[in-house]
Amino acid sequence: MIVKRLFIVILCFIFQYYVGFSLNNQIIPGAESTNEYIHLLKDKRVGIVANHTSVIKNVHLVDTLISLKINVVKIFCPEHGFRGEKEAGEKVKSEKDKKTNLPIISLYGKHYKPTSEDLKRIDIILFDIQDVGVRCYTYLSTLHYVMEACAENNITLIILDRPNPNGFYIDGPVLNLKYKSFVGLHPVPLVYGMTIGEYATMINGEKWLNDRITCNLKIILCKNYTHSSKYILPVKPSPNLIDMQAVYLYPSLALFEGTAISVGRGTDKPFKSFGHPSLLRGEYFFVPQKNHNKSKPLYCDTTCRGYDLSNFVFNDSNYFTIKWLIMAYQAFPDKRRFFNRFFYNLSGNDILIKQIEDGVDENEIRKTWKPEIEKFMKLREKYLLYP
């Protein structure tokens, strides 16, 4: 009997140890460490750059701060809007938040950068948006312009850092500044392996803001995060990245946005499938349809032929690939109409199009990226905040 009780006690101890270990090593975004930044907001007029991903557990950051008697005076929102419901490329209007009655200033409508008028009567700004670690995802550009506006108006910017779900690798072509745009402002690879806080530090350090000015930054770090972490997003970061499969496929399939190919918008598999009405190969068929916002996706109500990647299995060597891009090009009947000019901005150069048109295989194309990726990795080391 004594031996049995002792065995039960040991089992309970082991269970408590491992549960405690798991909880203690759970990744905690910066927003949740309120004790590290709440004192900086006391007696200040606070602006917040946020969207639907700006949550502490299941409570929005804005609601949390208001409950803590912080004087939130204005909200700024990126592409997809404050509630994350707008489609890609859809302009976002400034409005008032129905719940708090706070003004929401769109940074994806009439302007990308907060104006001096927007920043009047603001003492400090918080930035809390979940990024996905891909250069063409526009939250990065919003970060750039918010930093620039804060620097020009002598306002401190506090970044509540969040883990990068694609932060465990670096890949893809480095942007040639000749092709910089709102889907890529900086000379970094398509997948750059940094959190939003690290990236902001690099923007400052490399003097990428207008006139080489720098922003007064404070980063509230994530806890228990490393660059080998596979962080599962608790909230989808935008309407068409509906789960982690789509988040992992996004770097590869985002390049299709600069072609005639559909990436499954208007279906139940956006960024988990691709196709076209006249594609010559593919075992998967889908019909894009209007969504709840009534915006028409590409090839709305038309049957597309292509490929379903919902069950694609990732390993360390295939998180980013251009094999599907090459495959789609080869199966496209009118090759002159495959690429459009947006592809230059997404890929960041004018070389990749020519390589694909000339039939260069993926391995050879990758070799041409290697020198610039290695150069970037050395640059990146200076700005890493996590192991």
Image: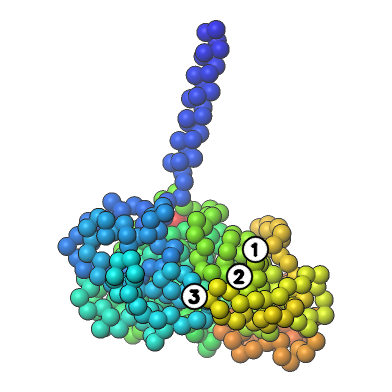
Mark 3 element type: loop
Mark 2 element type: helix
Residue 26 coordinates in the image, percent (x, y): 46, 46
Query: Which residue is nearer to you in this view: 224 or 64?
Result: 64
* Residue 246 visible at all: yes
Residue 86 - label: 3
Circle 1 residue: 319
Q: Quadrant of the N terminus?
A: top right
Cα gap from disc 3 to disc 2, whole angstroms:
21 Å
Circle 2 residue: 251
Q: State which tag comes first along the sequence, 1 or 3.
A: 3
Q: State which tag comes first along the sequence, 2 or 1.
A: 2
* Extreme residue in the top direction: 1
Crowding at mark 1 (Cα within 10 Å: few <14, some 14-19, many 20+): some
Residue occupying the point 43% across, 74% down: 81
* Extreme residue in the bottom direction: 336
Residue occupying the point 53% across, 18% down: 8
Residue occupying the point 68% across, 82% down: 299
Q: Amino acid at mark 1?
A: Tyr
